[in-house]
Image (spheres, helix red, strand yellow):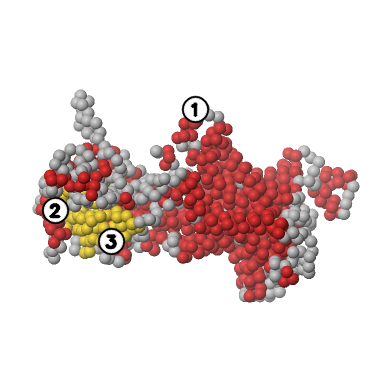
Amino acid sequence: MSFWRVTAKRIGYGFLLLMSVLVLNFVLMSLAPGDIADTIAGEMGGADEQMLAEIRETYGLDQPFHVQLWRYLSRVFVLDLGFSYFYNTPVTTLILEKLPATLLLVFSAQIVAIISGVVLGVMAAKKPNGLFSLSVTLIALFGFAAPVFWTGILLIILFVSIFPLFPIGGIMDVTLAGSWWEHTLDVLHHLMLPMITLASIFVALYSRLARASMLEVLGADYIRTARAKGVPERSVMYRHALRNALAPVVTVAGLQFSAVISGAVVVETVFSWPGLGSLALHSILARDTPTIMGILFCSALVVVVFNILTDMTLRLLDPRIKSG
Amino acid sequence: MGETDKLTQSSQKTEANTAKVDHNFILSIANLVVEFKTRTDTVRVLDHVSFDISKGETLGIVGESGCGKSMTALSIMGLIPSPPGRLVSGSIKLGEKEITSLSAEQMRHIRGSEISMIFQEPMSSLNPVFTVGEQIAEAVRLHEKVSSKAAMSRAIEMLKAVDIPEPEVRAKAYPHELSGGMRQRVMIAIGLACRPRILIADEPTTALDATVQAQIFDLLGDLQRETDTAIVLITHDMGAIAELADNVAVMYAGRIVEQGPVEVILSNPQHPYTQGLIECVPHLEASPSTERKPLIEIPGVVPSLSDLGAGCAFAPRCANCFGHCLTNKPSLERGTSGHLVACHLYTEDHVNVHPTASPGTV
Amino acid sequence: MSNLDTPTPNSSPPSTTDQGEVDSTKTLSPMKEMAFMFLRNYEAMFGLILLLGIAAFTFLGPLLYPTDPFEMVWAPFTYPGEEGFLFGTDYLGRDLLAEMIAGGRVSIAIGLSAAAISVVIGVFVGALAGYYGGIVEEALMRFTEFFQVLPTLLFSMVIVALFGASLWTVTFAIGIVSWPAVARVTRSEFLRIRELEYVTAARSSSARDGYLIFRVILPNALPPIIVQANLMVGSAILFEAALSFLGLSDPNVMSWGQIIGSNRTYILDAGFAVAIPGFAIFLTVLSISLIGDGLNDALNPKLRQRG
């Protein structure tokens, strides 16, 4: 099958997955005790049974389950994720406002983690019994075991009291007046600590994986062939081995996008980063169900898109993978 | 020059270490010792291995798995996994050049250009993420200053030389798109791309179908006649030896136990192990009417190299074993038939220590 | 022979090169040998001792140090070591040492039970998918994938938010979002083992599916599942900590994450109130993953061969 046909299949499949997420969303919302009517009544400061019934009728809550589900789905198709009574804003608007900050954090952390993880892993694989290899193994153990918020808090303490190099909260300095690139630099400056914190978990995972994968590939028959051809050791490492060793790392990195978003929820809270994670926490504490569900759907959408991109990368990287 | 003369000269050379070097040998190995460190002790995987090869000659190295054949090949290539492996002593001469003392970088230039090697597993010996054309062209560009375009056209030329149909198309194929036989042809193309003086083929057909095996052997024979490359053929298949080899070295437990011209070894094997290997080959000529000979096997297995005793390593499996065999290692000496054999049955004092044994019965 | 060679990430085909391999494992029984491997693995032993120490601290602690963790005993933010408080006091003036002892029990208990839930679900889904194959496998793996698309922490936050923050919902929420990893491991082991000869033999003697799945295949599939389950305990503890940190846990139950969550507003004044419970979580998860590595080495046949 051709590259694009497989990709089209993936997209169609991702679409189905997202539909299932929407159905799950809806089921969860109807299973949960209390409904929108209660929320609105709560916002209004209380209402009697008759008013509740009226509200239910207005929002179609008295309709049978499948009718409500169908309405919900068709509204999502026109990008209407409902209305947040807590923020008094459409959920779609809220999410679009916060999404860029989260994407910036998630994407930069993922890139930094992959690159440094692979570099560390390859260097460790060169001498699997050496001191460096041992320290990479240790970094991996520490990265897995340290709670991400704890790492973040330690970084904050470190950078506030000892090296005040980076800002420890927010995404930009609102008082800053300057050209667009000064603002960009300011955002990157604010990005550093949250990004390092989030990346730290995944650097551990990727370096360990890259090390194991490189060690396995270096024992492969085709590496012996390369050496027998007289390929220089550097080229054996980076041209022959690394490209084969990358596939498992990329596969796992693709699967980790959902975990990176999970991590981002915590990191955003620690560093008051104004993204979807902070929004999710606030709306959960405020019991703002439409917003919560909108965020859950949106994060699933991001994961699906990144999974498709990962899949395309993998098929470009390894000619053996035709599909599946 | 006859085969026997060659061997005489070789042994003279290694024994007397004369200053005069025989230019006919393009590869001379003398008293090669390789050891591997394991967790508990040190294991000698090659024990004083010596042989010589001339231009255009095929030397067959035979033996069961674990006897040191592949380790001999890797030693010549300078590719012993180290650690845990280590070349302890001995010399490997490529022409007049001693290569055991070369630096890693100098050795790298020899690999692929002067000595090439093809491996047992064609399925996994090619890099899955590069096209076969790229992999042949890479070998060319590593050792010759040519453009990538010229290297690719050489790759296509090589694919043609190893009888791959539609070489221009196949050059763009990935290894997984080719059959095992095709992949082994590609391996041969890589090995011969820089016209090496020596090609080491380590069980090149073990993983292939019988019909494909014959094709690969024919191909190797043809290419050798055209290019005059010397071939070291490592195999456990006596049939392949009979077909391709000029000289044979039989290895057992890291040592050469018998060595000589192929006709002599096949018709008049001296060492009980060699006799066993030859007996193992099934006889196809028997017609249904004649009584079929039962297949014979050598009893027992190759001993673990870590617990070799003081005596002959083959003694526990040998039907002709006698007391002397358990206490003394036999050295490789010229036996009664005129070629080299390491067995107490043929030493001069044999009659004294073992009056009843009759050589040739297994 | 041929079927036994089915490739898996852990097994390698028998070595065919002439490297004079040394067979050092002849006499020990597999169980003894595994125990030996594990005990000789210093990191794993270190992990085991560390974990036992933490368990002793938190389970035997109340006997030796009976202070009520919820009682305000002194001024807030007393530094560790001052006024006789080993770990100091928190923002409400509660004894941090007492809180640590009580919180550890909850963190470990939630970690164990959430991991148990995810292992039960994961093994069940993975076993059915791997055993039956075909349409059943396809459907179950799609179902698994569906769960992997939802960011786990966000998903469990949603469950806790919708159904209330009690000890049980938190445990359930963690278990229900983390089983896919177990399912994947179980499935691939089942796929491998179901082709082996002894399974074919049992099948041809018309054994029932339930017998084959639970009595024949599952015992042989256990090693990687055990390793994975061990890791699940670690990640469930981290998970609970993250939820508590975000303020989504039962406020009436003390846990390490809870201590961090309630003190995090004051990190610049009293970093120790956050650093100490964080370090405890770190040590616990570290010891669990060291044990996991040790188990992996001991249960992995390839490494065992190599010695």
Place of residue B79 in the rendered image (x, y in percent of width and height, measured from the top left): 32, 58
The amino acid beneath tag 2 is Leu
Instruction: Tell me: residue A300, above or below residue A131.
Output: above
Circle 2 residue: B7
Mark found first going from the N terminus, 3 or 2: 2
Tell me if B148 is positioned left or right of C290 in this view.
left
Gap between marks 2 and 1 measured at Cα: 63 Å
The chain letter under disc 3 is B
Residue B291: percent from left, percent from top: 20, 26
Distance (Cα) linking label 3 and label 1: 57 Å
* Residue A188 shows in the view: yes
Q: How dense is the environment of label 1, judged by Cα within 10 Å: few (below 14), some, or many (20 and up)?
A: few
- Report how many numbered discs are placed on residues in the image: 3
Residue A132 vs residue B173: left or right?
right
The disc at residue B110 is none
Kind of residue sitting beneath label 3: Val
* Residue of label 1: C205
For label 2, the crowd category at 10 Å Cα-Cα, with few meaning under 14, some 14 to 19 and many 20 or more, is: many
Residue at image location 47% in from the left, 62% down from the top: A133
Q: Which residue is mark 3?
A: B88
Point out the image quarter for the C terminus of chain B.
Answer: top left
